[in-house]
Image (tube, rainbow, N blue to C red):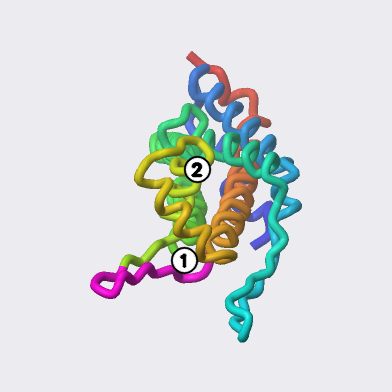
Amino acid sequence: MRDEDSPLEHAADVYRPFNRAESGMLRGFVLDARRLGRMKFFAQVPSRASWKVSEEGVSSNMTKPDDEALRAAITQFRQIYNPNEPHSFDKTIKLLKRSAHERNGPLRDAAITQLDGFIEAERHFLAGIGVGIVFDDGITQRSINPQTVLDAYFHGMYLHSGNDKSKLARQLDDLEPWGRLTLYSVMLGLRNVYWMTANVVDRVLRVGAILDTE
């Protein structure tokens, strides 16, 4: 499908007008997504890693991003990733879907289907990307999905520390390089989803007639 064939290209025919608060939220999401997308961390995300067992023991090889760049990216990433933040991806997509539903135009169903595609893309990266990690203590097994990896590093190491999630973050680091490769890869994948979503919101922001209404 060419871009011009997408119903999301025709914002005036898809959405009902957005009030000032809603318009401000949409502008804030785009600003945050663009700021995130241009951060230098994402140019440093490794595309591969290796792990080897030899007579000398276990060794791994992966080029890690700059720690300061990673910390800056996590701080910005959280503004979009956390659904409770004012300009989050979750709030933005829900607003677009609600507006399209209330406009109830002929493009409604097709537009909402395409918006749902962004939600599915986010779920894909949070559920399936990266190496499958399972902790086995000999009695029980615990599978660690990508969302849990992000939560452990974010709230156990970079945004907070000294809690139960810190222990999991240390365990993931002991599995070098797989825990951090998952962290970096998921952040990159979601950054791309958020950037593409900002492209959709940009289509709305170009139509002044449906913005900042009472």
- Other-residue count near label 2 (Cα within 10 Å), few / some / many at <14 / 14–19 / ≥20: some
At x 34%, y 71%, the residue is 136
Indicate the amino acid at tag 2. Answer: Met
Q: Mark yes or no: residue 100 visible.
A: no
Camera-side residue: 24 or 205? 24
Q: Which residue is mark 2?
A: 157
Q: CA distance from mark 1 to mark 2?
A: 23 Å
Residue 124 is situated, as x and y percent measured from the top left of the image, at 48, 61
Above or below, comparing residue 205 to residue 127 in the picture: above
At x 61%, y 23%, the residue is 209
Picture quarter containing residue 54? bottom right
User: Furthest residue to the left?
Assistant: 139
Residue 154 is situated, as x and y percent measured from the top left of the image, at 49, 43
How many numbered badges does the structure rendering display?
A: 2
Q: Which residue is mark 1?
A: 128
Left or right: where 94 falls relative to 2 = left
Magenta segment's dominant SS is loop
Residue 179 is situated, as x and y percent measured from the top left of the image, at 52, 61
Contact check, label 1 and label 2, Cβ < 8 Å: no
Picture quarter containing residue 60? bottom right
Q: Is residue 139 magenta?
A: yes
Above or below, comparing residue 109 to residue 137 in the picture: above
Q: Nearer the viewer, mark 1 or mark 2?
A: 2
Left or right: where 93 falls relative to 207 = left
Of mark 1 and mark 2, the one earlier in the sequence is 1
Q: Which residues are magenta?
A: 129-141
Indicate the amino acid at tag 1. Answer: Gly
- Other-residue count near label 1 (Cα within 10 Å), few / some / many at <14 / 14–19 / ≥20: few
Camera-side residue: 94 or 85? 85
